Image (cartoon, grey):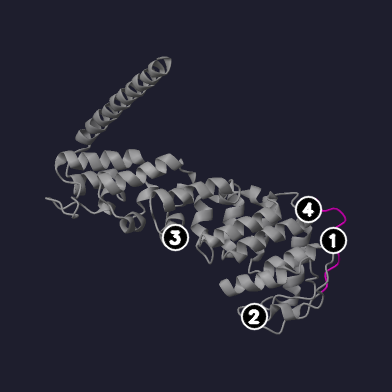
Amino acid sequence: MAALGRQVFDWHRLTPLTWALLTRPTRQPGEQKRTTAFLLRKLMTVSNGGGLEESSFVEPPKCAQKAEHRTGLTQCLLEKQRTPVSQENVVSSLLYMGFSDVHVNELLSIQPGTHPQQMLDIISELVLLGLNPEPVCVALKKSPQLLKLPVMQMKKRSSYLRKLGLGEGKLKRVLYCCPEIFTMRQRDIEVIVGVLKEKCLFTIKQVTEILHRCPYVLREDPGELEYKFQYAYFRMGIKHVDIVKTDFLQYSMTKTKQRHVFLERLGRYQTPDKNGQTQVPNPLLKDILRVSEAEFLARTAVSSAEEFEVFKKLLAREEEESEGCMADEEEEEEEDREEEQEL
């Protein structure tokens, strides 16, 4: 995929090119003509480029290289000067990127009015990041606003994601779970990355793994994300490597607290001492968080659903009272500061 991405870059850098001289080796001439003609008509209905008139189909000669290797694809291009993009450019480019006819039809229907060159630029950047055709289609259908992004913004964000290690196929899950990674402010991403590196002391490799495995952290409030880490590290005694390996940061604090404290009060979980030792064997984290509530109660807590429901209500009341006490203390401290200033 990385090799294909580099080739996409090589020939996409020359766009808009005349792709009418290229053909897809696996197609019969009659089938190619019918499919391309249909897709060109489809493009005409969604393009607002103006002046892009449907031209008669010209059957292109075959490239010398096999489609699956594509190593010498740029040698098949006979025109390298910049020329106005045409409907044939769009369809042929998408086909040679590996998109099927169904994919092309879907892409042309996602965002009516998108300029052909804009579409090619955005899709090419996604392919360069290591995404296969199917994930590209899914991402664009889920977030069609991506096709409206300024190309330069897309390129800069792509470069930034590569620096974070989210290229070469790792972006698939991130884009599926958090497609706004291309539209959100870079400053917001940098703040989350900064919390993971500087506040939580994860290594660069661990940060990349967290973003790949738990992309929802990008939506977290920075303060809440730091608190979630502190709870895992200090209250539960979970080390950095296990936080990453178990995807701990993807679970809500409510769920984590409820199950962890419930086990504590049942005597089935203890915070490890400074040597990492406990008097009782703690259950595995996956048996606490990665299972359904029914399985958690039956196998891990060995308790009833009724008892857990009563506990959750009590825990919620305890937290409300605790928050109320903290608010009162802050108010008293503020009053004391005001009195000192008056004196």
Comes first in the chain, label 2 or label 1: 1
Residue 49 in magenta stretch: yes
Where on the picture, by quarter, is residue 31? bottom right
Using the rendered view, name the quadrant where residue 79 is placed.
Answer: bottom right
Q: CA distance from mark 2 to mark 4?
A: 31 Å
Q: Earlier in the sequence, mark 2 or mark 4?
A: 4
**Label drawn at residue 54:** 1
For the residues bearing labels 2 and 1, Cβ distance under 8 angstroms = no
Question: Residue at left 63%, top 72%?
Answer: 6
Residue at the limit of the structure toward the left, as seen here: 279
Of residues 132 and 151, which is closer to you in this image?
A: 151
Q: What's the distance in space between the residues labelled 4 and 1, CA to CA?
A: 11 Å
Q: Residue at x 16, y 54 (%)?
A: 277
Q: Which mark is residue 71?
A: 2
Residue that carries the numbered disc 3 in the rendered image: 204
Q: Amino acid at mark 1?
A: Glu
Q: Quadrant of the N terminus?
A: bottom right
Taking the view exactly as shown, the residue that stands out farthest to the bottom is 64
**Gap between marks 4 and 3, in whole Å?**
43 Å
Q: Magenta segment range?
A: 48-58
Position of 245 compared to 148: left or right?
left
How far is disc 2 from disc 1 in space, using C-alphas? 31 Å
Q: Secondary structure at mark 2?
A: loop
Q: What residue would you read off at disc 4? A: 47
Residue 117 lies, with reference to residue 21, above or below; the image says above
